[in-house]
Each structure stands twice: as structure tokens, then as C-alpha cells.
Image: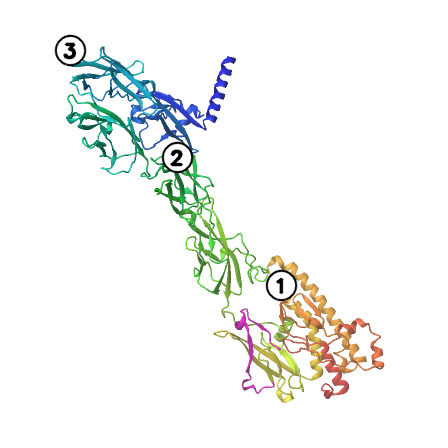
Amino acid sequence: MGERCCAALVRLLVLQAAWALSGGQVRYSVPEEAKAGTVVGRLAQDLGLEAGEAEARRLRLVAQGRRASVEVSGASGALLVSSRLDREELCGKSAPCALRLEVLLERPLRVFHVQLEVTDINDNAPVFPAARKNLSLSENSPPGFQIPLEGASDADIGANSQLTYTLSFSEHFSLDLQKTEEDGESLFLVLRKSLDRETIPVHRMVLTATDGGRPSLTGTMELVISVLDVNDNAPQFNQSVYKVQLPENAERGTLVIRLNATDLDEGANSNISYSLQMLSPQDGRDVFRIDKNSGKILLTGDLDFEDVNLYRLQVDATDKGTPPLSGHCKVVLEVVDVNDNAPEVWVTSLSVPVAEDASVGTVVALLSVSDRDSGENGRVRCWVWPASPFGLEATFLGSYSLVLREALDRERVSEYEVEVRAEDGGAPALRARRGLRVPVSDVNDNAPLFAQAVYTVLARENNAAGAELARLWARDPDEAANGRVSYSVWDGGLGVGVGGAAGSSSSSGGMGWRPASSYVSVDAESGRLWALQPLDYEELQVLQFEVRAVDAGEPALSGNATVQLFVLDENDNAPALLPAAGSAAEAAAAALAGSESGTLWAWAAWGAPAGQVVAKIRAVDADSGYNAWLRYELCEPQGGKGPFRVGLYSGEVSTARALDEADGPRQRLLIVVRDHGEPARSATATLSVSLLEAAEAALAAGSSAASSSSSSAVSRSAAGAELGPGAASAATNVWLVVAICAVSSLFLLAVVLYGASRWAPRAAVLSGPGPTTLVCASEVGSWSYSQRHSRSLCVADGAAKSDLMVFSPNFPPPPPGPAAKDTQREPSALLDTVSGNILLLSLSPPNPSVFPGVQALRESRLRSHGPGSMSA
């Protein structure tokens, strides 16, 4: 068992070594005339294929332009004889007779070269030119005289074509076979004994040719020799062999050679006629002819080097003696090759289309190139035009592969027209070309690309739902599904700030962050951008989101574009009046006084100079730009004859002239706030100004500051009344805290007023050293800002507007003296509490029930100083 394994291993190694030495070529041999189905060789096994792999990978022969008479079995992978093999038909006299076959193997594509040698068998018998040969011989021919004979021909080669000749018994004649390097074999009939016409006028013999095959085959020819009377000088040529060269493109009628034979006889015995016999090839009899009188050999047919490159002729010169005598010579004609055959290019295999992501070196086609000429005329040079992106690689003699040399891009070139050009080495050179169409198949290698990276879209607010806002377009140069683009709003991008620009705080709108897809939608096919709902500039000014374009390739590729949607403002909001600080308490006071609700209240002192600001109307417009630019106009009293005027853009109500008692105790002003939109929208404010004496105005101002805290409590209780049962406890606690703060404020105010009226000058009641302080009242309490923050306007709901609120008359500090020293006995905190200059704005006139300190001060001064003291 071990010896068998070793023997198999040795055979495998020998086979591999033979494969390497032969350059990867498989060689087989098969005898001609083998029966159809005869196994030539186990091709699949010799190529190293597994069982069943030959059929799976489609092992097959590639056609070479002529019938190969063999085929590959798809099941077993064996090389079989498919039809009659005739070596003489395939190769003629060429030896060895080797057929070059190409075997194609797919997945992956490989080409193997197989050389099949068709061995000769002795299937052709020798054949003489004629079955009977008539010869004439003068009776006075000396012994040893030689008569040339045409030998037989055998289509076989090698030993099967080696002929031996025998002559039937004759005492006068024998055979002589002469072999020379120049002439080859020459057969002669030799006269051994003098002839006697009167004894034997005609000699009949049989010439037999036997080949060297096993078994041998024979051919015969009858020789009939007529003995002639004396004509003892035969024509003679000056050379026994003439060699001639003639190009294969020689025209018919061309003179090949002119022969001249001489005869020493005289008269009719010296008149010579010429005849021509074809020795080889046998089918060349119609190519030449000889003029029987002149001895000129002329070309009567066409020469073709690729078919026959050598002709052997025999010329006989016969005199007209009695009997006639003949002289013989040979003419060897060599056909010279000319470049008369263009190269031939065949496409044996073509693998198209080629994917655009195919790697460099991919085999696109297999080509076979040949030229029937020889030498330089048959040496072929091949190339590809255009030179890129394909190239040629030589795989075997006359075989080429068309391979990919550069990367492909279908979007740049979708199809290539390739020409394989061949040129031989002749002069002039002949060319051939073969066109190939190589389409390039698409792969998804291009992502959709938008025309713009950022799209800016303008849309007016209050647009209709479903209105088209813009049209987006992305280009994908791929084809079919790889280039079909669908659009979508990418919710994974930036969020949306409601109530401001994208990315701002959401607390202003109170609606939080919302996805962009809740506002807009994009059509998946057309890229049209739609609005899903009406847009509100006051809710949303800028919406930034991304639109994604995705193709239908595998894998899918995508591209993004940023869309910035700017909402344009429309004048859809009228100005809104803002309540002043302490508005709730003053509204309650106005109600107790029987005044109209919603009316703004202010105090002014009689004698106030022109230009003194007594109040400021505050309004806001939710729109922006010109739509939010407000102007203030005084409607009542009409004609501008009243003692007050209003700033056109500031809303400040100031005295138009000095006030006197003729103006009455109260002035009612109707102020219209109007924006600059188209059409303009407006709101109306009613301001009631109470005219008081200077001291009463000052006391009312102090009491109003204290009551601002209590007014917050009133508003807070009113707000608590609107709460549900679940929030009643929290509202009650807040109200108690505010009430305590209000009572404390009233107590501190009374102490300060008492100290100020006793120890300080009257001018210092409302002024003192230190920075100006702004006291702001809101629903959550009271607080103050220093003068550097006085540009912030505090209103009841805590919102801020950039405006000036505090006005500082810059009262001088109190003069030094006992009064100043007395003030130092009081805590400094009491003075710091009321330091600075305070401007009070109230919604209702002073009421004794709300401001008891003011009423008590007025009564005490009336008793001590009289009625006119208040005006002082």
C-alpha cells in the first residue's frame, strides 16, 4: 500500500515538473482516423480540476477558425475525438502535425493551451502518376543507359512514406534509386544489356512501389518500352537541375525560365520538342506550361506561398529522329513570399458590460491574432486604440487578453468603442482592426448633491396651510435606481425655537421645542417644500432645518442641505397698553372714588412749569420693525388747547404751559397709540390728571409709594380669586406675606414723614444725599435699582423695556445746622430708605381712606397755619 502511494506521489511530481517545463501547456497525441468518442486525454484531471469542477466552470474549447475534430466532455472533462481525423487533410506533408487548441475555464476566467499531435498511420498507398508508362529506347543504346522514371508519391509521412521500388524480372533492365541532398530521390530505369529490336521489340515490366508502413502498402505502374531504330544521339541540357525563384504575386504569363537543349544529330534527328512534367506537387499541373518549340516555361496559374512554396518540374527534350531520343532536366521553382496577407484578429471571448468599479487588471476579452505570411511579413504587432483605459497583454503565441488598465467612471464615459489594431512587419506593412463595444454598468458611487448647500426661504406669516414655500433639487449622476432621489425633512438635525429665532429659549413662547416636520413638509419625489400650518412671526421668526436627499441604490447614499426659513412680519397685532406699577391698588382706589375702571391716573401740582412730565404712557406691539414702531397722539381735548401734551414717540405726558387753578381739579386726556403698519392699528388710553397743591402732591406721592405694596396684595388677592380650589392655600400664604410687608412699609413711611416734618427743612422731605433709587412694584413684591440700572422700565408683570423712567431734579442737600444734627439722632437706615428722588405714577386720585397720613397732615396744617399754608 505504501509503495502505491509513493508511486502516485512520484507521478504527480513528474506531472508538475513536466507542466512547469512545458510552460503550462498540455500536450496530447492521437492517431489519425481514430473513431469518434476516442478519449484523447483526461484534460480536467491534467489541469488540476476536481471532480465536477469542469462542468461547473464550463470547461470548453475555443474555436480557432477551423474544425478541430475534438471536443471536451462536459461531464467528465475528457478530451474526445468528435469527427474524422485525417492528418493529410489537416497538415499535408508537414511533420509533426500539431494542432494548437485553447481551452477556456470560467469563474475565474482562465485560458489553457493544449497541443494535440495527430500521428500518422499508414492509410495511404503509394500512387504513381499514371498506371501505364510508355517509353522508347533506341536499340543501339549502350548498357548502363538510364531512363528517368517518375516515382510514386505517398501522402503519409515518416516511415510510412519511405518508398522502396522493385521491378519485375527483366534481363535487360534494372532499377537505380539515387539520393542527393539537392535533388532528393531520383529513380532511373537502367539498361543492363544491349537491346535487339528484332528479338524483343517491346519490353513490358511492372514497377512496384512499397512504403515503410506496417502493414506496408504498394502501388504499381506498367512500363512499356518500345525499342526504336538507331538514332543514337539524344538531346542534352547544359544543366541537369535548374533553380528558379519567383515571387508569389507574379502575374500570369510571366516567363519562369527558358531552357535550351542540344542534339548532335542532324536533320530530323536534331529537331527538338519540349514537354513538361510535374513532379511535385501533383495538383500543380495547371500552374505552368512550356512552349514545345522554344523551351520557355510560362506561368499560367496563381502562386501562393502559403499553399505551396516549392515546385519540382521535369522537362523532356525529344528529337524527331527515328526513333526519337530524349534528354531530361529538372527545374526547382522556389516561391518567394510577399506581404500579401493582412493580419487577422478574432474575438474568442467577450465579457461585457464591465462594472465601473472593476479592478485594474480585469480581463474584458480574449483575442487571437495570426498572419498567414512568413518571416517578417508574418510577425504581427498589436495594440489598442485609444490607449486608455484598456490594454493588451500577450498570453501565448498569437493570443492576447484585453485587460483594464485604468479605473472606470460611468458618469464620465458610459460606453467605450475600442479598436484592436494589428500590423505586420512587411514592406509595405498591412494592417487589420477589430472593433469592440464595451459598455460600462453603473454602481452607486455618487451621493445626491444639492444645487446649494444652504437655501434661504422667505415666507410671510399667516400663510395658508399647504402653501408651497420653495422647491429643492438634488442631482445624482448615477442611473436608474442609483440616481432616483427621494427627499425628506431630517428631524435629526437642528431643533426649532418657538417664540424667537431657531436655537433661542423656548420660555418666551411657552411652547417648548418642536420638530421642523411639524411646520414644513417636503414632497419625496419633486422636492417641493410645503407649509403644514400657518406661520406666526410672533411665535417663530427663523426656522432652520435640514433636508435629506437619499438615492435608491444599494447601499443608499445621501446628501443634506440646510434650509433657513425666515418668517416675514405682517401687521396683525394692535398696540397693547402696559399697566403702570401699583396699578392694582390704584384701580381699587379709583373704584372707591367712583372713577371709571381702566383709566390711568396722575398728579400734577398747580403752578408746575411748562415741560414738566407728569406721566408716561407705555405700550408695546407684538409685531416688529415698522409694524411695531409706535407713535402717540392726543385726541382729547381736541385742537391741542389743553394744558398737557404727549411726546410723539416717547409717550411722555408733560405740561404744555404752567398750570393754574383755572384748569380745574382734574383733566381727562384721551391718547391714541398707533403703529406704522399698513394698515395701521391703534389702541386708546384714558389718562386722568388730578391737580393738587404742591404739598398735597408730595404727600400723595409718598403715600402712593407705600400703598404700591398694598396694591400688590390687592391684585394678588384678586388673582387668587381666579385660581382653582387646588391653589387657594398657596394664594392665601402669599397674600399674608404681602400684607405684612405693606403694613411695615406704612409704619416706616409714617416715622420718616414725622421725622422729616420735625427736624428737616421742607425742601428736604423728598430728597437726601445718595444715588438715585428706582422703586419698582410688581405682583411679587417691591425692589429697587441703582441709578446705573435706571434705564430698565419695571411694569406690573415684570417685563422689561429699554426706556428711561427715573427723572432726578437734583435737589440740593440740607444746609448744616441744628436740624441736621437732630436728624443724626434717628437711625441712618430711616434716611437711607427715602434717599434719592422718586417719581410716582398712580392709577387713581389720592383718597383719605387709602392715604390717612396725607389727610392728617393737611388737617394739622390748616389748624396751625390757616388755609393758605398748604399752598406754601
Mark before the other along the chain sequence, 3 or 2: 3
Q: Which residues are magenta?
A: 616-643
Decide: is 219 above or below 62: above
| Residue 398 within the magenta-colored segment of the rendering | no
Image location of residue 179, percent across then percent down: 32, 20
Residue located beneath label 1 in the image: 720
Q: CA distance from mark 3 to mark 2?
A: 69 Å
Does dot 2 land on a helix, a strand or a loop?
A: loop
Classify mark 2: residues with Cα within 10 Å, few (<14), some (14-19) or many (20+).
Answer: some
Return the x and y of residue 555 as percentages of the image width and height.
47, 44
The correct choice, above or below, for 788 with respect to 373 in the image is: below
Which residue is label 2 attached to?
398
Q: Residue at x 47, y 26 (%)?
A: 21
Residue 847 or residue 449, whichever sits in front: 449
> Which residue, given by chain and number where applicable, does mark 3 sit on?
199
Q: Residues within 10 Å of mark 1 (few under 14, many from 20)?
A: some
The question of residue 632 being in magenta is answered with yes
Decide: few, some or many residues near mark 3? Use Cα within 10 Å; few <14, some 14-19, many ≥20.
few
